[in-house]
């Protein structure tokens, strides 16, 4: 009986064990599976992102936090409105003063000054007090003046590296968002390999070109505030922008920057003449004649008696028109362009000079609009085919009735874009409408 289990075990049949192996996947099946996996990952990611975006405001509300917003890095400049005198003037009534007008203006000023000198009770205290006021304005404004060094890297005859620099005066326009904006001459940045800015109290920092106006001879240079030494950063300040429309003949002005050809020099003088509605490229402007006798081309800026920036010396007009004056362009008419430069935006340029079509001209059959006196050679308008004698009536569908309309409309255009410009041109005894496609340029 004891052998029964062994006998039973010997009679059992061995169990056959097999491993079932699936056939290998084909390339097509492998690709399908990879694609499904990838698609699932994408769908999961999209769902997660949407869920997060939808739930974040609710979560922040419960947690007492407001969503973070980043302010647009835009600098805005408040515009000045022309006075009644400027609004009533026409382009026909005034232009750059010829010699006779300059002489008459000088005689008028001399007469006013002579009369005041004869009647003014000059005492030592009054003279010293007046001089102290002017000196204080100059000293205060000089904290806003910097030296912009234009650095060029060259080699000598023996291929040794040589660094040459040119020094120009600049004036601080704003300090905001950790960035210092400096107005200077366009010549300071042209062909420069690098820019170096030296502040009044010795702080030095690298400068970068924000934007320039080659036609106007100006540029804005940017400096990171963090790169300026702390001691110098505490003392620098931005100059306030004034209203140059309020300047009249006889008003005192102070020239800072480089009026003597040396940065941080100061001169005093008066506005000797104000020329209104002077035709310039793509607009018109007032021009100030001062008796400061400043050196131009190195950066000279004019302040009023409140220490506000009201203009800058320019070389845009020839020596034959100066008659011993220093010519300054006023700030008010340039504030729109200045805002563009400070935001790194190119100033749009078409290259037209013109004047309003007066009622008398309209009575003679000339259409209402802007009478083109000159299409500047090689300008976008000139290359498109616009000619002197054309009457500009519309830009991009906007009606143009005056030089101010033209300036405002052009300011809204962007450099590099195409604009439809409509003009009226005389042909076969009548005016006919012509449309031109003008590629807006940059100054």
Image (cartoon, grey):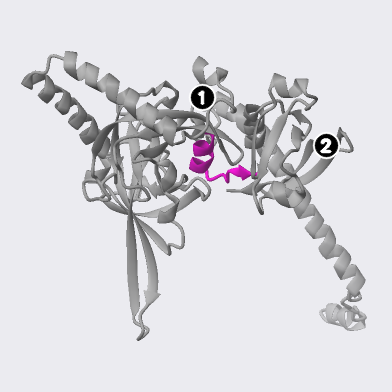
Other-residue count near label 2 (Cα within 10 Å), few / some / many at <14 / 14–19 / ≥20 = few
* Residue under the point 64% across and 45% down: 351
Q: Nearer the viewer, residue 355 or 65?
A: 355
Residue at image mark 2: 426
**Label 1: element kind:** loop
User: Sequence-wise, which precedes: disc 2 or disc 1?
Assistant: 1
The outermost residue toward the bottom is 158
Q: Is residue 357 above or below residue 436?
A: above
Q: Position of residue 59 (x, y in %)?
A: 59, 29
Q: Residues within 10 Å of mark 1 (few under 14, many from 20)?
A: few
Which element carries disc 2, helix, strand or loop? strand
Contact between labelled residues 1 and 2, with CB atoms less than 8 Å apart:
no
Q: Is residue 337 magenta?
A: yes
Residue at the front extreme, as displayed: 100
**Separation of residues labelled 2 and 1 (CA atoms):** 69 Å
Number of numbered markers: 2
Indicate whether residue 423 is drawn in magenta: no
Image quadrant where residue 312 sits = top left
Q: On the rendered structure, is 96 left or right of 296?
A: right
Q: Nearer the viewer, mark 2 or mark 1?
A: 2
Residue 130 x, y percent position in the rendering: 17, 23
Residue appearing at x 17%, y 16% in the figure? 118
Marking on residue 64? 1
In percent of width and height, residue 314 lies at 42, 43
The residue drawn where x is 34% and y is 29% is 106
Tell me which segment is drawn in magenta.
336-349
Residue at the image position 84 percent from the left and 81 percent from the top = 6
Quadrant of the snapshot with the N terminus: bottom right
Judge whether residue 367 can be spotted in this image. yes
Tell me if residue 365 comes above or below residue 265 in the rendering.
above
Query: Picture quarter containing residue 237?
Result: top left
């Amino acid at each position: 009986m004891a052998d029964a289990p062994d006998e039973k075990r010997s009679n059992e049949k061995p169990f056959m064990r097999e491993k079932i192996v699936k056939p290998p996947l084909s390339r097509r099946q492998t690709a399908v599976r990879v694609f499904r996996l990838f698609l699932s990952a994408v769908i999961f990611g999209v769902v997660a992102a949407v869920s997060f975006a939808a739930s974040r405001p609710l979560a922040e509300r419960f947690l007492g936090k407001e969503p973070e917003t980043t302010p647009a890095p835009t600098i805005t400049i408040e515009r000045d409105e022309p006075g009644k005198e400027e609004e009533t003037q026409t382009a026909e009534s005034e232009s750059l003063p010829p010699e006779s007008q300059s002489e008459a203006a000088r005689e008028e000023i001399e007469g006013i000054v002579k009369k005041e000198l004869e009647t003014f009770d000059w005492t030592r205290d009054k003279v010293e007090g007046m001089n102290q006021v002017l000196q204080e304005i100059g000293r205060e404004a000089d904290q806003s003046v910097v030296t912009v060094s234009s650095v060029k890297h060259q080699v000598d005859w023996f291929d040794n590296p040589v660094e040459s620099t040119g020094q120009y005066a600049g004036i601080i326009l704003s300090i905001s968002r950790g960035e210092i904006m400096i107005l200077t001459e366009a010549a300071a940045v042209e062909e420069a390999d690098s820019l170096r800015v030296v502040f009044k109290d010795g702080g030095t920092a690298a400068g970068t070109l924000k934007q320039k106006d080659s036609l106007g001879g100006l540029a804005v240079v940017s400096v990171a505030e963090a790169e300026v030494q702390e001691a110098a950063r505490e003392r620098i300040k931005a100059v306030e922008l004034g209203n140059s429309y309020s300047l009249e003949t006889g008003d005192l002005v102070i020239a800072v920057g480089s009026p003597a050809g040396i940065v941080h020099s100061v001169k005093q003088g008066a506005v000797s003449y104000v020329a209104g509605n002077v035709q310039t490229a793509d607009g018109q402007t007032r021009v100030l004649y001062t008796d400061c006798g400043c050196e131009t081309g190195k950066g000279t800026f004019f302040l009023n008696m409140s220490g506000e920036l009201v203009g800058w010396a320019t070389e845009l007009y020839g020596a034959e028109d100066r008659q011993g004056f220093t010519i300054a362009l006023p700030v008010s008419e340039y504030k729109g362009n200045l805002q563009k430069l400070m935001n790194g935006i190119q100033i749009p340029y078409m290259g037209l000079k013109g004047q309003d079509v007066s009622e008398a001209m309209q009575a003679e059959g000339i259409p209402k609009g802007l009478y083109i006196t000159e299409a500047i050679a090689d300008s976008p308008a000139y290359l498109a085919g616009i000619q002197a004698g054309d009457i500009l009536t519309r830009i991009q569908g906007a009606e143009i009735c005056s030089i101010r309309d033209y300036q405002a409309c052009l300011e809204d255009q962007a450099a590099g874009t195409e604009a439809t410009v409509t003009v009226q041109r005389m042909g076969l005894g009548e005016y006919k409408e012509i449309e031109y496609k003008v590629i807006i340029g940059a100054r």
